[in-house]
Image (tube, rainbow, N blue to C red):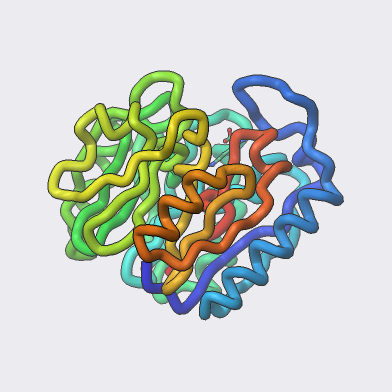
Amino acid sequence: FEFTHALCRTPALSVTDGLRATDQGDPDPLVFAAEHAAYVSALRDAGCDVTVLPADDSFPDSVFIEDPALVLNGVAIVLRPGADSRIGEAAALRPALLETMADVVDLQTDGFVDGGDILCTDDRVLLGLSARTTAQGAEDLRPLVEAQGYRLDILQTPPEILHFKTESSLLDHETVLATPKLAASGAFQGLNVIETPHGEEAAANAIRVNNDVFVSAGYPRTADLLDQAGYAVKVLNTSQAALVDGGLSCMSLRY
Ligand code: CIR
């Protein structure tokens, strides 16, 4: 959770066509842009040098830049996103990774891995299999993760949860924030778990960036819980990302 840099992508106007499990209306691209700008500012305030890539209208979900790549030790691993409309985001992102990262390697697989299914601790990469991330993709990722000195733990994201990190986030060296459902899956052995209060499950898509913990607006009990646990909570609006199943972690690659 200690980062000097972040890479983001401006939301596309086509974000109105973004994937979603349940339709609650399209996001408003202008409101999304404002929320995204505030998010970028918060990353800068937290101490990150942020590169913001231009919008890519050919990929409605391209603002969720965390899904097509994983960065470990400043090395980008180009992934293979598991949604048809998103698979091309990996190749579209690659040139920017070559410019911003220390090195770029490609996940060679017939399977799929979405970055949203990956939670990194200091020495472990927790990867939740999901509708987007397959066992083949996970096994093919293993050597790339191990080459960076991390252990890969392949876990199961419970059904109905889009991504492993939709319902979990790292808070410090040994603590995660997670929903009761994901915590009950046994994924977090060896780590302390703070569970989101009932009705505030969506708050689990948080991020720790240096001293700050970013939490989405609308989850006051989670914010209080984290505040009382000693974290410096920063509340950010993610109303438009939420309409297309996105949240705080999905909108940046932090390194
Ligand atoms: C999708 O379904 O792929 C996007 N609408 C949302 C992706 C959110 N990303 C994430 O949780 N890492």
Left or right: residue 27 compared with residue 95: right
Q: Residue 46 at what x, y percent from top left?
A: 53, 75
Numbered circles on residues, count: 0
Q: Report whether 95 appears left or right of 132.
A: right
> Can the viewer see residue 111?
no
Query: Most extreme residue toward the left, as rendered?
Result: 190
Quick one: quadrant of the N terminus? bottom left
Q: Nearer the viewer, residue 253 or 237?
A: 237
Q: Residue at coordinates 43% horizontally, 36% vertically from top-left?
A: 197
**Front one among 69 and 140:** 69
Considering depth in this image, is 46 or 92 the residue closer to the camera?
Answer: 46
Q: Which residue: 63% across, 32% down?
A: 85
- Of the 4 image quadrants, the one containing the C terminus is bottom left
Q: Measuring from the top left, give residue 121's x and y in whole percent.
A: 26, 58
Q: Position of residue 178 (x, y in %)?
A: 36, 41
Q: Residue at x 51, y 29 (%)?
A: 199
Along the horizontal axis of the image, is 45 left or right of 32?
Answer: left
Left or right of 220? Residue 25 is right
Residue at (73% x, 24% y) in the render: 24
Q: Is residue 168 above or below residue 201?
A: below
In the displayed structure, would residue 128 be above or below residue 252?
above
Indicate the position of residue 70 as horizontal and vertical percent values. 41, 55
Residue 182 location, quadrant? top left
Can residue 116 be seen from the camera position used here? yes
Give the image quadrant in which the ligand numbered 1 is located: top right
Q: Is residue 78 above or below residue 139?
A: below
